Image (spheres, rainbow, N blue to C red):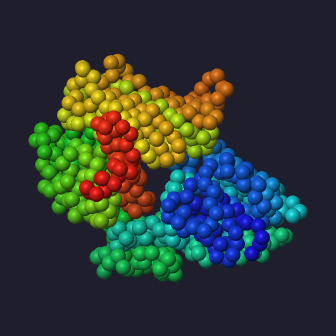
């Protein structure tokens, strides 16, 4: 197409990665840029130059390239509430991405700049409209942070144009296609993919807005069109173009959930809807057309009350009624979308208390006693040992699983549980609730946004006097091997991986018990952990501290400053290198143990509904368990242990 390469930002996402491939197919040299490329996307982009890292850092470096054009698609689409940032910060972040890309384009000699905007700039009442459709003449008025950033971006693109540097904004509408996945800045799947996920899980499709008209673009076709546009880029004329002309009434006039109609009570087979949009894109698109919906809002009469039906409460069995279950019963009880259909516990006293509190709920000694209950999911509040029969029963009955951490007290057994769930297509989520703390989200955001430059080393201290004989605590850790590692450090290792966005490589560790301990296994852990991205963390944890209250301090040092968390549930601050005082970070209100568990449970429910992919999966949890096992081995050997050794051994024994 042209001599110089085209820079594509946001190329780690499913839309811009397809655009990069479309350009490459017509012989265009492409530089694909994003903060991260997952393994699948990196494999698809083999042969395309990729640059990975924080965009605010790598974009200025790309000004040395002789670019012919820039396609700017990088954006934060997840809501500020979901990302736990202010609206102003959300807008600022998107504006900085755009202005940085514009600056690089001009400094690198590009002559064309395409800004990927969105049809989300419109509200239903916007006008003028032509034949019931929004066009380039329609004046947008949407004011959410994402829409505002897109509208402002269109104006900035126009303002940046000058002789020899043409700019254009292209508003994209509803898009579906292969390789779509959730990422941090885009935490949802499109409606088509959610419908496909639902039909794969349940054999049905739930239509929530049957009157709505939606126009959908098949991504590979759209990407080819954008490649053609770059070859014949307009240097004059409209400053904004539409990739399609969306229906002005696409939101519909009312929302209605699906119920089974007479003659449609039985679900069809999963083959009734295409399993892969790439295999049958036209069929998937037609299923969303208004004239394909019957009078009950069903697609081919397929909707019926079940796990995917949003009008039916999610039916939950809770297994284990001990100390941890008390928190879960409060969280579940506060969720109007949940119906507890059975409880079970081997302790007759626990069953008696539960019968007094929930007289209308069936209660059994074991899961097998109540597994016949019409349920959708199981919450395992049980000790990590002895879950084999419970996991097997859930997989056999196709019940989604939320299990308290750790998944097992044996790494190979945990790996086997993960394989069982994956083979049965059963969601398996582990209760790593500390990920959902406001302080955790804020710290992760600070590091991602480069507030302290590149983080390279950290110190994580957790020193606590835990009296394991208190009746509000689970008692089984008193007799565990390595209770600190299995019950507490597992949280900390998960937080390190989650906040730093990297995986461990090797660990040196020493575990031991003080003379005054009440625990059978080691309660002290000292570890030096090396991560793939170059991070090194010095970890110190104990349950048998010589002083109460708890001493919590997690400090991360970067090339330009530090971030420090000084309380387990809050007190986050940061400072640049030469700043004498730390700057506190505002955090949302939080109820310890409740707010984080509530957010985790909401994510699990969304997974069961088929409206969101699972977070804190069993497969992801294994990576933290490998760290734990490496600590045990390193302490026994008095030598560093490679994580790959643990992974290989656990997989072989699973």
**Residue 519 x/y as whole percent:** 22, 28
In x, y percent, where is residue 553?
46, 28
Q: In the shown orientation, is residue 611 left or right of residue 469?
A: right
Residue at 64% of width from left, 22% of height from top? 580
Name the foreground residue: 130 vs 363. 363
Q: Residue at x 67, y 48 (%)?
A: 56
Q: Is residue 482 above or below residue 293?
A: above
Which residue is most to the top? 547
- Residue at (28%, 65%) from the top-left corner? 424
Whole-percent x, y for residue 502 in the image: 49, 47
In this orientation, does residue 73 appear?
no
Q: Quadrant of residue 47?
A: bottom right
543 over 304 or under it: above or below: above
How many numbered marks, from 0 up? Answer: 0
Pick the front one: 163 or 44:
44
Q: Position of residue 458 (x, y in %)?
A: 50, 34
Q: Please tell me in which quadrant of the rendered image residue 30 appears.
A: bottom right
Q: Give the camera-side residue of 51 and 17.
A: 51
Residue 652 visible: yes
**38 lies above or below 291:** above
Nearer-the-camera pick, 117 or 493: 493
Residue at left offset 31%, top offset 32%: 511
Name the quarter where the N terminus is drawn.
bottom right
Q: Can you say which quadrant of the picture contains the C terminus?
A: bottom left
């Amino acid at each position: 197409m042209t001599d110089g390469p085209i820079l594509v930002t946001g190329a780690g996402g499913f839309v811009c990665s397809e655009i990069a491939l479309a350009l490459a197919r017509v012989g265009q040299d492409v530089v694909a840029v994003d903060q991260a490329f997952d393994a699948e996307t990196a494999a698809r982009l083999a042969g395309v130059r990729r640059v990975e890292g924080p965009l605010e850092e790598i974009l200025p470096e790309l000004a040395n390239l002789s670019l012919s054009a820039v396609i700017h698609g990088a954006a934060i689409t997840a809501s500020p509430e979901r990302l736990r940032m202010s609206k102003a910060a959300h807008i600022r972040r998107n504006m900085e991405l755009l202005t940085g890309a514009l600056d690089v384009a001009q400094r690198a000699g590009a002559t064309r700049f395409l800004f990927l905007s969105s049809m989300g700039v419109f509200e239903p009442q916007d006008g003028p409209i032509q034949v019931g459709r929004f066009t380039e003449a329609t004046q947008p008025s949407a004011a959410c942070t994402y829409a505002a950033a897109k509208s402002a971006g269109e104006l900035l693109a126009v303002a940046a144009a000058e002789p020899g540097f043409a700019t254009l904004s292209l508003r994209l509408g509803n898009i579906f296609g292969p390789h779509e996945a959730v990422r941090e800045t885009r935490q949802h799947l499109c409606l088509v993919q959610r419908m496909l996920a639902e039909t794969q899980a349940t054999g049905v499709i739930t239509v929530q807005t049957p009157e709505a008209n939606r126009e959908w673009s098949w991504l590979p076709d759209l990407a080819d069109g954008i490649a053609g546009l770059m070859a014949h880029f307009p240097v004059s004329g409209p400053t904004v173009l539409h990739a399609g002309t969306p229906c002005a009434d696409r939101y519909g006039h009312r929302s209605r959930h699906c119920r089974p109609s007479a003659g449609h009570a039985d679900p069809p087979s999963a083959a009734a809807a295409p399993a892969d949009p790439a295999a049958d894109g036209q069929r998937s698109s037609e299923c969303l057309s208004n004239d394909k919906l019957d009078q009950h809002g069903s697609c081919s009469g397929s909707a019926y009350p079940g796990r995917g039906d949003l009008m039916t409460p999610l039916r939950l069995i809770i297994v284990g009624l001990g100390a941890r279950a008390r928190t879960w019963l409060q969280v579940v009880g506060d969720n109007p979308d949940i119906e507890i259909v059975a409880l079970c516990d081997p302790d007759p006293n626990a069953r008696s208390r539960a019968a007094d509190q929930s007289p209308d709920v069936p209660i059994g000694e074991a899961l097998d006693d109540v597994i016949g209950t019409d349920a959708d999911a199981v919450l395992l509040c049980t000790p990590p040992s002895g879950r084999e029969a419970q996991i097997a029963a859930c997989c056999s009955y196709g019940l989604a699983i939320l299990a308290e951490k750790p998944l097992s007290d044996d790494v190979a057994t945990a790996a086997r549980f993960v394989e069982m769930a994956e083979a049965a297509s059963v969601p398996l989520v582990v209760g790593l609730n500390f990920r959902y703390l406001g302080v955790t989200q804020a710290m992760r955001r600070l590091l991602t946004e480069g507030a302290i430059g590149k983080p390279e080393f950290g110190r994580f201290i957790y020193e606590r006097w835990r009296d394991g004989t208190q009746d509000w605590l689970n008692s089984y850790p008193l007799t565990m091997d390595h209770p600190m590692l299995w019950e507490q450090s597992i949280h900390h290792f998960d937080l390190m991986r989650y906040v730093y966005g990297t995986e461990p490589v090797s660990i040196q560790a020493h575990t031991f018990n003080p003379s005054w301990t009440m625990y059978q296994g080691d309660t002290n852990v000292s570890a030096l952990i090396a991560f793939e991205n170059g991070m090194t963390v010095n970890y110190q944890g104990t349950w048998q501290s010589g002083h109460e209250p708890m001493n919590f301090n997690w400090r991360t040092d970067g090339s330009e400053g530090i971030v420090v968390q000084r309380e387990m549930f809050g007190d986050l601050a940061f400072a640049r290198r030469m700043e004498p005082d730390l700057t506190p970070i505002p955090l949302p209100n939080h109820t310890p143990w409740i707010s984080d568990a509530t957010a985790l449970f909401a994510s699990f429910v969304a997974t069961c509904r088929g409206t969101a992919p699972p977070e804190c999966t069993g497969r992801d949890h294994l990576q933290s368990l490998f760290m734990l096992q490496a600590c045990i081995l390193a302490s026994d050997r008095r030598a560093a242990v490679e994580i790959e050794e643990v992974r290989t051994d656990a997989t072989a024994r699973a």
